[in-house]
Image (cartoon, rainbow, N blue to C red):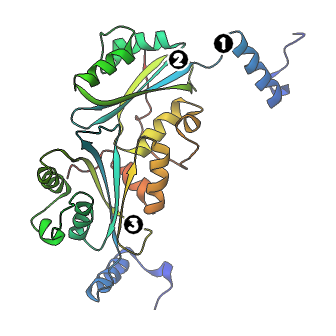
Amino acid sequence: MKHLREYEEQDIKDLMGDMKTIGQAPMEGWIVSISSFDVDNPSLGTKYYAITADNLKEAYAMVSEDWIYEEEDLVSFVEDIDNFTELSEKINDSTDQQMGFVVLGVWEGLRPISKESESFIIDGINPFEAGRILSQKFSNAQSVMTANPRGNTE
Amino acid sequence: MKHIKPIFEYDDEDIRGLMGDMETIGQGPMKGWLIIITNKHGLTTGEIIIADDWKEAQMIYDKNGTISGQGVHLASVLAAMKQNSSLIAWDIIDDFKARVYTKGYKKWDMANPYATVEILDTFFSNSRTVMSNMSVNALMMPPGITELKKV
């Protein structure tokens, strides 16, 4: 047992790996900027998904839950999905393109504040409010989004 | 030099008074406008204009903005474009007070809220009040993002 300051980056990575092997992996976080559409109710501005989950598939399932109203097995719905853009296309198809969303940017590597899985949609029309809420959800939201202003495409 | 003191002799109240006097004779800070447009592909762009008045702002926009060459009836043009589905939604937000003393225009992609906050805070002294009363602390953005195209 060493003092915390004596741990090197590699020690911490190894420790995280050990935690994963015993099923105690930390939650993961994603921010997905989207433009939602509803042919009957157009809206202005970008929205943000702030997702905390155990893994990507769970993240996809939580996003799908907002759009798939029929009794559908969310696990099988996201089974063949490889990224958020694919997910949006599948959701849009399932509504006959009447409502859904377009992915504008994806940020990963967020450190969630929450210890439990959760998904929020944050309205981005007021950037001050959106930034404040994202920073409440993830301790490193600002630095991650600053380092990669447009996010990844998928 | 009967009425003018060395600068260090002015206290904050003197300077605020002087600024107020300047505003009363039409020499206050320039005004700002934010135009938000969500295009038919869902991409939302922000465009700011700094000018003396709305008419001049529209003339600057007409030369530099996304929708140029339409004259000084921007709101009508945007409304017509929404009507014919060329864009999904739009808004024009006024009442901004410019921090800079140069007229200008800037456009950016609003997909990142921290970038948008940085830009608004750089050019306007009251952007937080206009957009909301919320605040974001200690922003860090790459150099270049706050460059204004001078016109």
Give the spatial CA distance, label 2 vs label 3.
41 Å
Q: Is residue B9 above or below residue A125?
A: above
User: Disc 2: which chain?
Assistant: B
Q: Amino acid at mark 1?
A: Gln
Q: Are marks 1 and 2 on the same chain?
A: yes
**What residue did someone put label 1 on?**
B27
**Disc ID at residue A63:** none
What amino acid type should be assigned to the residue bearing mark 2? Answer: Thr
* Mark nearer the viewer, 2 or 3: 3
Query: Quick one: label 1, few (<14), some, or many (20+) residues within 10 Å?
Result: few
Give the number of marks.
3
Q: Secondary structure at mark 2?
A: loop
Q: Is residue A53 above or below residue B44?
A: below
Whether the residues at callouts 2 and 3 have beta carbons within 8 Å, the answer is no
- What's the distance in space between the residues labelled 3 and 1, CA to CA? 48 Å
Is the Cβ of the residue at disc 1 closer than 8 Å to that at disc 2?
no
Q: Give the percent coordinates (x, y) of residue B133.
A: 59, 43
Task: Give amino acid for label 3.
Answer: Arg
Name the foreground residue: A142 vs A113. A113
Residue B81 image offset from top left, x and y in percent:
27, 21
Mark 2 lies on residue: B102
Subunit under mark 1 = B
Residue identified by numbered label 3: A111
**Disc 1 to disc 2, C-alpha distance:** 13 Å
Chain of residue at mark 3: A
x and y percent of residue A49 in the render?
Answer: 33, 55
Among numbered discs 1 and 2, the one appearing first in the sequence: 1
Please, what secondary structure does the residue beneath circle 3 have?
loop
Callout 1 secondary element = loop
